[in-house]
Image: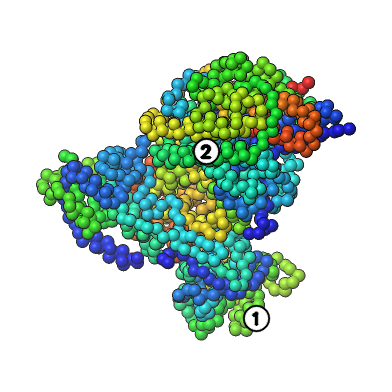
Amino acid sequence: MNKNKVKEKNKKIKNINLEYIMSVNVLKNFIEVLSTKYKTYAPVNKEKRVVWAQIKNFNEISRDYIDGIQTTILPPKYFFFPPNEKLLFLNSNNVDYKKNEQIHEPFILFGVHPCDIHGLLLMDKIFLENYVDDFYKEKRDNAIIIGMDTMPNEWNFSKSAGTDIIDSGFDIFLIPLKENKFYIKIATKKGLSLIKNINGLFPLNKNDKKLLTEFYTEKNKRYKRNVDMHDLPKLLDRTYESKIWDEIGKQCVACTRCSIVCPTCYCFNIKEDYYLNLIEGERVRTWDSCLRQNFALVAGGHNFRSSLKARIRHRYYHKERIFSYIYGKSACVGCGRCSRDCKANIKPDEVFNKLRQLEIKS
Amino acid sequence: MNKINVNVHYLTRVEGHGNIVLDAVNGDIKQLRLEIVEAPRFFESFLRGVNYKDVAYVASRVCGICSIGHNNASIKATEAAFGVKINEQTTLLRKLMMHGENMQSHSLHVYFLATPDFLDVPSVLPLIKTNPDVVKLALKMKRLANDLSDISAGRTVHPLRNIVGGVTMVPTKEELDSIKKRLRNAKNDVLFTAELFKKSVKIPQYERETEYIALKKDSEFAIYEGRITSSDDMQQVDDINYKDMIKEFVVPHSTAKHSRNKRNSYMVGALARCNLSFNDLKPFAKEIANILGFKVPCYNPYMNTYAQLIEIAHSIEDSIEIIDHFLDMGFKEPLSVDVKPKAGRGVGVADVPRGILFHEYEYDNKGNLVSANLIIPTAQNLENIEDDMRKFVPVWINEKKSQDEIRQLLEMLVRAYDPCISCSAHMLKIKFE
Amino acid sequence: MPENKKVKVAFFDFASCEGCQLQVLNLENEFLNLLEHIEIVNFREAISEKSDDYLIAFVEGSITKPSDIPRIKKIRENAKILVALGACATHGCVNSMKNMFKINDVKKATYGDDDKLFDSEEAKPFETFEQAMPLDAVVKVDYYIRGCPINNKEFLMVVKALLKGKMPEITDSAVCLECQAKGNICLYDKGEICLGLISRGGCDAWCPSNGFVCEGCRGFIDKPNIERMKEIIIEKGLSLEYAEKRLQLFNSWELTKNKITLIDDKEKK
Amino acid sequence: MKNSLYLPVKTKILKTKKLTELEKYFQLDLSNFKKFDHKPGQFVQVAIPGVGEAPISIASDKNKKNTLDLVVRNVGSLTNLMHKLEDGEYLGLRGPFGNGFPMEEMKNSNLLIVAGGIGLVPLRSVIQFYLNNKKNYRSLTIFYGAKTDKELLFTDEYETWKTKGINLNITIDRESPTWKGNVGLITTLFNKIDFDYLGSKILICGPPVMYKFVLLELIKKAVPAKNIYLSLERQMKCGVGKCAHCAIGSYHVCIDGPVFTYEFLKDKVEAL
Ligand SMILES: Cc1cc2nc3c(=O)[nH]c(=O)nc-3n(C[C@H](O)[C@H](O)[C@H](O)COP(=O)(O)OP(=O)(O)OC[C@H]3O[C@@H](n4cnc5c(N)ncnc54)[C@H](O)[C@@H]3O)c2cc1C
Ligand code: SF4
Ligand code: SF4
Ligand code: SF4
């Protein structure tokens, strides 16, 4: 798909804009119907965390997630760009490769956060533009996205990142309101077909609109983390030599978790291996991380980023600049996953704030 | 002059390094010993200071082949020291792990290490060509055993899920269902093996009555828990008093301590367990014993391999019962009980593939290990093996066996005990006489 | 491949639990298939055949006693490719825990009052070095298959690569990469000290995926940030003493060699 | 069979030739490609099934429609196995990838090629392009440095280049009894050879250390940064801007490069 087609598709999505109100019970029923037709994945509790898992009914969905206490460990990228993916089969005798053709069925991702939808749209830029990554596209084309707004969790700073609101990239969008109601927005034909047989959708009345406003007021109030993210690429350029990078370099232990849990980190490695006949084999891609020691090693032994400082700084520079260049906006969508899971306590919002403050001071 | 000189350097098809030295002139034995030259690894010494959460994890490294056994004995010792009471579910899961290990270790020995002797080939490799069906069956059995360990203990070599107080994870229902099916099918394989052995295997017929020591429990073939029991007068002691029965002593030619009770030596392992608790075996195991013509009491050490096959049958049937229990009852949270370390001493005993195993620990009040003593099955068998040799060699010389035949019979004898020398040599302690 | 074209492979062991060789045998059918391409000329744990003619030697175990030295040197001479198999061989494993103690103390703990006899002539065969060493402390090692025990899939990958003349690609990322990619719940969330943060992966996060902490059995990643690891333990209110002990379980060789410690002597007092 | 972005095309090796101890030349048959349109300075992903892929520069001009030249230095897994391949055997190939040198933009200028070691390989495609399109360019001068004379590439083409008017200057790092020409690092040529540095387009490729020193020379001579073109090397897994191994700041070397102007690179972090 080239740039124009993506734009066209996005335009089409914007064409429909139907808004309703429904009760929790209608939603419950809706999910039960959906999950019989499609594999439906949603955030569910696992021990004390939240993970994506297939569900059959509404009660399985994590309360913590809806209440904005925490988000899923892994972001939705997992579904389109899995951690281990067999790309090709190979035959070394014939010097022949064949695509690993997978059969895809439509599936539903239920409850995707606005910031995670932004994340997916960014991933689309990487995987669907210039050269189309067929493996990503095949899965992406089959996904039905049901977005859901929730309260922000304590690490989330999507408001600062400008990703707290979303108007495309989903088929249906939900907002949990008081009085056991849900706001529902249908954005695509696909979405429309899903709700076709659902009874109990009502147009928004005055009270509903009030509830909606209340939701947003409450949501905005709940953001604990705020950071000025305007002009980030330039700020970073100006602070490339800042001593803050030395500090952060000392702080990081290169565990690579931040990039694994990030909805917009997409580095990968490709490896080939033989089967036991030593003739056939396969090409596999796996998640990689730019924080890994030898990530930027080239033949001859030169490592372009051998120090931890260089590597962690690269993560920030790559995130903030590459996307501003192709997407016009930072790649950090403020989901807070890396802040939550970095055991070394490195939080992007704090890093940006520090850089900004340092600049104001000097 | 009729001179016999057997020197087997680095005994093969056993785990660890051992040498056999035999020197006989005109039927007169000048030298006869099983040397253990395995490098000592000082476990007792470096376990000191290790936190109780890690002790079993390190202790399992004594031996990769019976790591699940070490892991369980170690955890039991720690639980005894802290007075931790585990629940029934944990006990059953641990039994399942031990069955997995038993099947794995026994099938490795029965099919890969001992069978070549009986079929008179140097190793399992030629069998791949001559008896591919046996090899395939053996591999299938090992795979099944390993998978049983994997789903219960996390992995076969150095288990992961077993911790002081309980387990970290339990098998899924799908895993239980599928392994149960395979266990059921495996019964046919064991039957086939028993028939095959009956038909084509000739076990050397030499007997020596000795003392047999194993765990024993009422109405259960004991492997995980029971009382330490001797075949001599059915003497019994509890875990904590194991030293009343197991007396260690040192010999100059070995890095492993030998042990004895009232006689000069005793035997542990599958044959000892079968001799002590034959009646508690599952019916299927008894059926296999019947096919093999195995009767208790059995004083032929070469029959240990048969006893192992019988135990494989037992483990299969008992595992199926445990799995059925879990399929009926499901698993209950929490998977482990709270553990509060305290200063004290504890002994953990388990009857692992090669025989009864003892771990004794002393902890400080922070839960760091102060001292440890480990008594490993093979080390307990060493004196018994030498006693067998001392009895059989003159017989063989009498029977005019050639030097080669004697060497072969000696190697077979040592292998029949399925010795795991790497673990027995953990405690270098030599006395210089 | 005709019989005589098979690559000759040998297995040897030094001080170890032999679990890594067992892991090789645990490959079962895959091991059988491998025999189509290789001829095993030495594998004491499984076969009686012995020969000095081999191309690849897989060596398990640590070097712990004087008689090991000529033996490993001979293996090195005979083998074109020497692969260290498992943690004992690659970096000392639990064997090297004794390196943390003073040797006299080790002797005392094990021999009691007989420790003086250790210097006598009769004890020669049982003499051991003060340090348990990985293979590369004595000979050049071409490839490292890490882990206690090894991941036998990785072993297969290495064998296949070597047979095809390809350099095996051995992971250099931390355990956390594979652990997080599996979506595991991090053990720090349960108040445990997990060494996955600074330990080398490639095991598919075997231990954390089974609910047990990573004990660092594959050694550290290149240039581990131990200083920061220490601060993390303190910040999380976990026991430094405990973390130190955990660090020592598999990595005492590297820790003593590079004098790395979480608690320096001043703090100890 | 479905096509895929990652699917290499089976490509026959027509000719091979050992150039030096470490470098081997390959001529490939492009007939399995529906279309293969490349520019000087672009690269391909070469695959050996079971081993993987590596980015290798195209060493020939696009005028040679049906064949493609590569020169490969044996440094690792894949390149070592490539060296074992002979005429008539096959490789997997994807590409061409990358931007290449903007030959259009450089029209009507003097060209100066500065190549170190294997860096001459991508620039050979420029040399061939020049020879085919001589009328569009004013002149071509080459500065080429190697460690020893044994490591010089394309030696049998030097005569042709010279007779066709290319100003070829070679230097080797260390003296050698078999070498009569210049001795010294490539930077020494800048003082020896009088040249209209200011009014030329300068194309550079070589090992990372060489860039630093050559750039210093050019800056000394006040060459405008926009006239300097460099071809960069990075680890690449995909070649198509997905895997991010080659990312520098905002750019993927594989799709935005490998050729960049110095003007573009000078404020980019970790680029050089
Ligand atoms: C745009 C571009 C164009 C290029 N053009 C050319 C060209 O025309 N010709 C050419 O020859 N090259 C070219 N290269 C470089 C070439 O791509 C690399 O040399 C190649 O990828 C090496 O692949 P490999 O599999 O042989 O080496 P690898 O096996 O990946 O090894 C690469 C380096 O790492 C080291 N290494 C690998 N494994 C280990 C290990 N286990 N332990 C320690 N060190 C290790 C090796 O010694 C070597 O130095 C180009 C690169 C780029 C980006
Ligand atoms: S999660 Fe934290 S410690 Fe780990 S690599 Fe990322 S920044 Fe470094
Ligand atoms: S950088 Fe961190 S906060 Fe930003 S999108 Fe990635 S994981 Fe979320
Ligand atoms: S459990 Fe251990 S290995 Fe896994 S993410 Fe946490 S620290 Fe890393």
Residue at which label 2 appears: B145
* Local crowd size for mark 2, using a 10 Å CA cut-off: few (<14), some (14–19), many (≥20): many
**Amino acid tagged 2:** Ala
Residue at which label 1 appears: D159
Q: Nearer the viewer, residue C45 or D160?
A: C45
**Amino acid tagged 1:** Glu
Note whether ligand 4 is within 8 Å of mark 2: no
Residue B3's spot in the image, x, y percent? Answer: 85, 33
Chain ID at mark 1: D
Residue A311's spot in the image, x, y percent? Answer: 48, 50
C227 left or right, relative to A259: right
Q: Residue furthest right?
A: B1
Is residue B339 shown above or below B305?
above
Residue plotted at (42% across, 54% down) = A266
Residue D116's spot in the image, x, y percent? Answer: 60, 67
Q: Nearer the viewer, residue B162 or A291?
A: B162
Do dots 2 and 1 share one subunit?
Answer: no
Mark 2 vs mark 1: give the one in front: 2
